Image: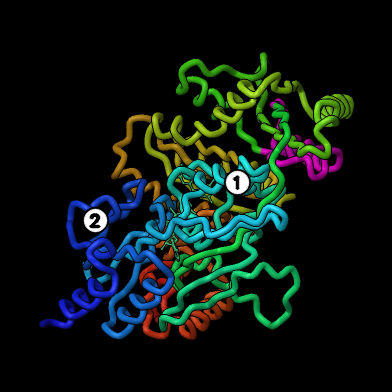
Amino acid sequence: MSDRNTFLAAAEALLGSRGLTRDSDLMEPWLTDWRGRFTGAALAMASPASTAEVAGLVRLCGEHGVAIVPQGGNSGMCGGATPDDSGTAIILSLRRMNAIRSIDQAGLQAVCEAGVILQTLHEAVEPLGMRFPLTLGGKGSATIGGLISTNAGGTQVLRHGSMRAQVSGLEAVLADGSVFSALVPLKKDNRGFDLKQLLIGSEGTLGIVTAATLRLVPALADRAVLWAGVPSLRAARALLLHCQALAGDALEGFEVMPQNTLDDVVAHVPGARQPLAGRHEWHALIELVADRSNVDRLGSLAEDLLASAFEQGLLEDAVISSNEAQAEAFWLLRDEIAPAERAKGPAVQHDISVAVEKMPEFVEHAVPLVEAAWPGTEAVAFGHLGDGNVHFHVIAPPGVESLAWQAGDGKAISSQVYELVTQWGGSISAEHGIGQLKRADLARLGDPVALALMRSVKLALDPQGLLNPGKLVSLDKDAATP
Ligand SMILES: Cc1cc2nc3c(=O)[nH]c(=O)nc-3n(C[C@H](O)[C@H](O)[C@H](O)COP(=O)(O)OP(=O)(O)OC[C@H]3O[C@@H](n4cnc5c(N)ncnc54)[C@H](O)[C@@H]3O)c2cc1C
């Protein structure tokens, strides 16, 4: 028996026939990322049912030198869960490990296995008067393990922080098959390094997340969704500061988009309408929330906030959603930006951040610069202004051939945007990670000291380099990529 067959036989003996497949029809959907940008091949797809099975499998892979590509819902943005095309790695799917092990109502904590889908967690805690305060467009497929491994963000980071802030305990299988078990949610623990934080955002390169203890918050009693028109992104930032000062913790979301982008969404979504009568350079979507303790004050807070903002000249026009259907309609305009853009034609997307206070200036600088250097393109920035994170998308000139434009001008534009954001002291990945998509850019533009540190950590935790090779960080310091 070849070593490969010995490995496969041992893996099947460990996991059973349900836990291991080589059926190309079953594997096929998981070999390409959801955006269709990366396709690979795999020796097999393993679907363990327990932490012990993950540990046994990882040990087996170490003995046989088989690389492992961890995978959750395959909803990632950077090709991190897609194997290379050698066909020598296995996909380790965590989707079968989908139990919510426990929910602690008094302590506001839930222990979830890695394969629990985000929406399932939302639905499980809601009837108990709680919520998990992180949401994003991929909630129907993204898993807790994937969200942790990419340190996902979304639209509630402004108030609650990204995934990193929601994890109070972690269980993970390390490259040697040992289990790092730190699920107890200790509020204070100063026994040295916070190892769970090292694993969060490591994109499957340092360990396999098998379970986590997650923070919950009381359910919302009500929300008010406001839509404001402002003359500039600087004005939007001034409005954000005003909201933060007045609403404090009640401010849960603050998203921005330019008028052109709103026009595209309204044209794309059947029945959609501009929330305001006039036209404004920029629009802000503001969400205020209340739990049972302050629900009586929500309506007056929203009105006071807008009245004082008008008085101070911070906005041109604004409206408060009159009911939940209108609140949903406002959010739909935000959520449909990406589909409306896809309908318009090819584009290159950049998920970037700079210091929050510098974002308006950055956008004012970068948009004309890119549009002048590549005539006919349309550069737009939208998203999470309150986090200093916008999605900076550049839409191709009308009529270009998509693949050729992406590979030529599109690539050059991305390099330019990432160089610019680095010059401004920002990040080339605010919430989507590095995966295989941004590896070369990280190698080119990353701080050499930080990259060397990442390599040292990788070498210490995964000396054989079997955990998600080709993603984020590599062991080879001379490689052209990190
Ligand atoms: C419509 C849509 C909207 C989105 N909006 C946002 C957004 O606003 N903000 C945002 O941050 N993201 C967003 N995303 C991206 C996506 O949902 C996140 O990246 C998510 O965190 C990935 O979860 P997943 O389970 O699908 O992971 P996968 O895509 O399967 O994997 C992602 C990475 O994590 C690794 N991984 C997965 N599971 C594990 C595990 N158990 N242990 C170790 N490594 C693991 C993989 O190897 C890979 O590197 C969106 C996606 C979609 C489809």
- Quadrant of the image containing the N terminus: bottom left
The image shows residue 181 at horizontal and vertical percentages of 55, 75
Q: Name the foreground residue: 372 vs 417.
A: 417
- Quadrant of the image containing the C terminus: bottom left
Chief SS of the magenta region: helix
Residue 162 in view in this figure: yes
Q: How many C-alpha atoms fall within 10 Å of the one at disc 1: few (<14), some, or many (≥20)?
A: many
Q: Which amino acid does label 1 sit on?
A: Val
Q: Is residue 233 on the magenta stretch? A: yes
Work out whether 98 lies above or below 185: above
The coloring applied to the image is: rainbow
Work out whether 134 lies above or below 325: below
Work out whether 88 lies above or below 165: below
Residue drawn at 37 percent across, 72 percent down: 53
Residue drawn at 67 percent across, 18 percent down: 276
What segment carries the magenta color?
Answer: 227-254
Q: Name the residue under label 2.
A: 27
Where residue 256 sits, quadrant-wise, is top right
Q: Name the residue under label 1.
A: 125
Q: Which amino acid does label 2 sit on?
A: Met
The image shows residue 368 at horizontal and vertical percentages of 57, 40
**Which label belongs to residue 224?**
none
Q: Name the foreground residue: 56 vs 479.
A: 56
